[in-house]
Image (spheres, rainbow, N blue to C red):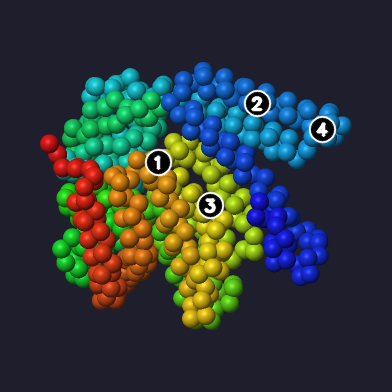
Amino acid sequence: MTGTGPGEHAAGVAGGSPPPSGRVPAARDLRLVLPTLALFLVTAATVGMRPAAAAALGVVLLMSAVIAVVWSTTNGAASGIDRTALGVLAMACALGATGAGVQAARSHALAAHPLMSLAGARTGVEAVVTGFDRPVRSGGVMVPVRVEVTGSGESARAADLDVVVLARDGWRGLPPGTRVRASVAVLDPLSPGDPPGLRALTAPAVMGEPGLSGRAPAAVRERFRMVSDLALDGEAVGLLPSFVLGDEGGVSTETRDEFRAAGLAHLAAVSGANTTYVVGAVLLAAAALGAGRRGRIVAAVLALGGFVAVVGPEPAVLRAAGTGAIGLAALSAHRTGRPLAALAAVVLLVALLDPATATGAGFVLSVTATAALVLTARSVAVRIRRPWMPGPVADVLAVCVVAHLATLPVLMASGLEAGPWSLPANIAVAPAVPVVTVLGTASAALGPLWEDGAVLLAAACTPALWWLDTVAGVTAALPGSPDLTPG
């Protein structure tokens, strides 16, 4: 492991002397990584598994953990077996058992939810909007909600479940936190272990307005649409809010199909890479202004908080901010162990608290990008540094390149990439993505305060947006690219 090499010790202590008192060797920082990986694998393996089967797997893993502990305590030293390795194995089995138990409980709760027995039927629901709507090919929108009450009158049953509503009239533009009531048709789950979908049969009756955490991002989005319309022309008007805020409402169906066929649709999803680009640019600016280490840290924290405020504190954004912050911490650390352990802790918490999210493509992409930054960004920055290139520029360039390239295999494996040209397409747009993300986010943040400045920043994105749109169009037209047009 890189954290235990001689270079790491030399970075911390001159002359290769032992680490100072109280400093934990990097190898110990990595002890959480393998158990967290075990938890993730068990969580992924038990998706859709029957509760009894998942519980049985949990019992087997728990017994394995007990055996490892007993063996380490009674026979480890006498047989020459590494007690530390047995401890890591015991922790991995214990966390795997916990993950299987959580999945069993989740599957049981899902099966018992009243919506599960209503597939194909109609019912009334009371729900809270949990995120912004996204357009679908049919012309409607997908709205993430948390159903709190199913049915009406004496038949109403209270039980929470996160689902997606397919809707049309009245559902567009509802800020997160809005409480609604509507009549819906319950759709069959797409796959085992998934909750059912809902199709709205009526416009939502608003029962409660959102709080500030929902209204503020909605106002930023509305203002940013106006700024984009003033600064840009053609498809770029809708593309900029899509790339910066995940707001695809202004993007035509044809353009969305081109980006999907080119394997570039993931650019409209807020991920850890977005936070990395934004905070990395702030670190670069702070360093250029002569700020010290503490000043750069304060600037990075403020930028991260501002990014969450602008994009909206949805769960996906908060997870992206967390993983992105860990990745940037690796650039200022002299070893990879502790940032990697911090990333493992984030994965562990998400896998335990929200297994469905932990195995989703978006979270896996953020974790993959962050792990790549932790492991390779510093060495890449050193290799690309030149006499004419300042160190901070090399650091930010390394962050952009590593984060973008590391996620390509995951995109291809998850099916988010379509067609044989997706890999070269993603490599081709790599220089443009950070430009749009950084300048666009700054424009969105400035919009409510200074419209002319926001328009200027948005207009500066024109060349990068043109390049992104051109690459998507050319790639989608190449032989072998999928035809996503209906019919």
Mark 1 or 3: in front is 1
Q: Which residue is drawn at 26% across and 27% down?
A: 187
**Circle 1 crowding by C-alpha within 10 Å: few under 14, some 14–19, many from 20:** few
Q: Which label's residue is closer to the chain start, 2 or 1? A: 2
Q: Which amino acid does label 4 sit on?
A: Gly
Q: How far apart are marks 2 and 1 (CA)?
A: 31 Å
Q: Which residue is drawn at 47% across and 68% down?
A: 396
**Circle 4 crowding by C-alpha within 10 Å: few under 14, some 14–19, many from 20:** some
Q: Name the residue under label 3.
A: 371
Q: Can you see residue 143?
A: yes
Depth check, front residue: 34 or 226: 34
**Circle 3 crowding by C-alpha within 10 Å: few under 14, some 14–19, many from 20:** many
Q: Name the residue under label 4.
A: 76
With respect to residue 144, does 125 lie above or below?
Answer: above
Q: Name the residue under label 2.
A: 62
With respect to residue 110, does 20 lie above or below?
Answer: below
Q: Can you see residue 316?
A: no
Q: Mark 1 points at which residue?
A: 413
Q: Which label's residue is closer to the chain start, 1 or 3? A: 3
Relative placement, left or right, of 415 versus 37 is: left
Mark 4 or 2: in front is 4
Q: Which label's residue is closer to the chain start, 1 or 4? A: 4
Q: How far apart are marks 3 and 2 (CA)?
A: 28 Å
Check whether the beta carbons of the residues at disc 2 and disc 1 lie within 8 A of each other: no
Q: What residue type is labelled 2?
A: Leu
Q: Which label's residue is closer to the chain start, 3 or 4? A: 4
Q: Distance between the residues labelled 1 and 3?
A: 17 Å
Depth check, front residue: 50 or 430: 430
Q: What residue type is labelled 3?
A: Ala
Q: Where is residue 483 in the image (x, y as percent from the top left)?
A: 19, 43
Q: Which residue is drawn at 48% across and 63% down?
A: 399
